[in-house]
Image (cartoon, rainbow, N blue to C red):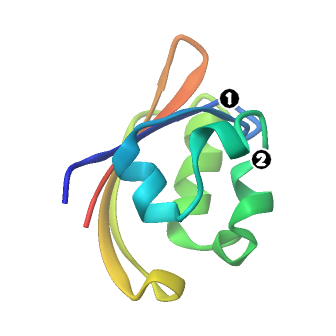
């Protein structure tokens, strides 16, 4: 699978998703632009990725993590970083 790349504002609103992210999530960028990620994936709230996202969005340093996401039955390697006020996420499964 190609790398999933997505950009969010600090409140997790979707700013950009590449086609790999659309395939992974099962919804398109045009369908979800401006929506909060956690509203689309409420089962992710509180998981390790959610916590890393929140720390980075609050101004923390870049984080890398591996975690299992049960709804997709997959392990992910994520990089989460703040770039120009937006949270950039790269994921590989």
> Of all residues shown, which one is farthest toward the left?
1
Of the residues under marks 2 and 1, which one precedes in the sequence?
1
Residue beneath label 2, please?
36
Tell me the tag on residue 80: none
Q: What residue does disc 1 label?
A: 9
Name the quarter where the N terminus is drawn. Answer: bottom left
Q: Residue at x 39, y 36 (%)?
A: 62
Specify the quadrant that holds the C terminus.
bottom left
- Nearest the viewer among 85 and 63 is 85
Q: Is residue 52 above or below residue 93?
A: above
- Asked if marks 2 and 1 touch (Cβ < 8 Å), the reply is no
Residue at disc 2, secondary structure: loop
Q: Residue at x 60, y 45 (%)?
A: 55
Residue drawn at point x = 78 percent, y = 43 percent = 35
Q: Residue 59 vs residue 77: left or right? A: right
Quarter of the view holding residue 76 = bottom left
In this rendered view, identify the residue nearer to me: 74 or 10: 74
Q: Residue at x 63, y 35 (%)?
A: 57
Residue 59, located in which quarter of the rendered image?
top right
Secondary structure at badge 1 equals loop
In the rendered image, residue 92, in percent from the top left (x then y), is placed at: 25, 58
- Marks 2 and 1, how far apart at CA: 9 Å
Disc 1 residue crowd, few under 14, some 14–19, many 20+, Cα 10 Å: some
Q: Position of residue 33 (x, y in %)?
A: 70, 35
Drawn side of residue 76 relative to residue 53, left or right: left
User: Can residue 57 be seen here?
Assistant: yes
Residue 88 x/y as whole percent = 46, 32
Outermost residue to the top? 84
Q: Residues within 10 Å of mark 2 (few under 14, many from 20)?
A: some
Image location (x, y in percent) of residue 47? 59, 73
């Amino acid at each position: 699978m190609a790398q999933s790349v997505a950009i969010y504002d600090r409140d997790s609103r979707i700013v950009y998703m590449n086609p790999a992210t659309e395939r992974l999530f099962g919804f398109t960028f045009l369908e979800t632009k401006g929506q909060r990620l956690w509203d689309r994936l409420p089962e992710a709230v509180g998981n390790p990725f959610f916590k890393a996202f929140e720390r980075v969005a609050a101004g923390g340093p870049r984080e890398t993590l591996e975690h299992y996401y049960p709804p997709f039955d997959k392990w992910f390697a994520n990089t989460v970083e703040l770039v120009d006020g937006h949270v950039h996420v790269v994921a590989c499964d």
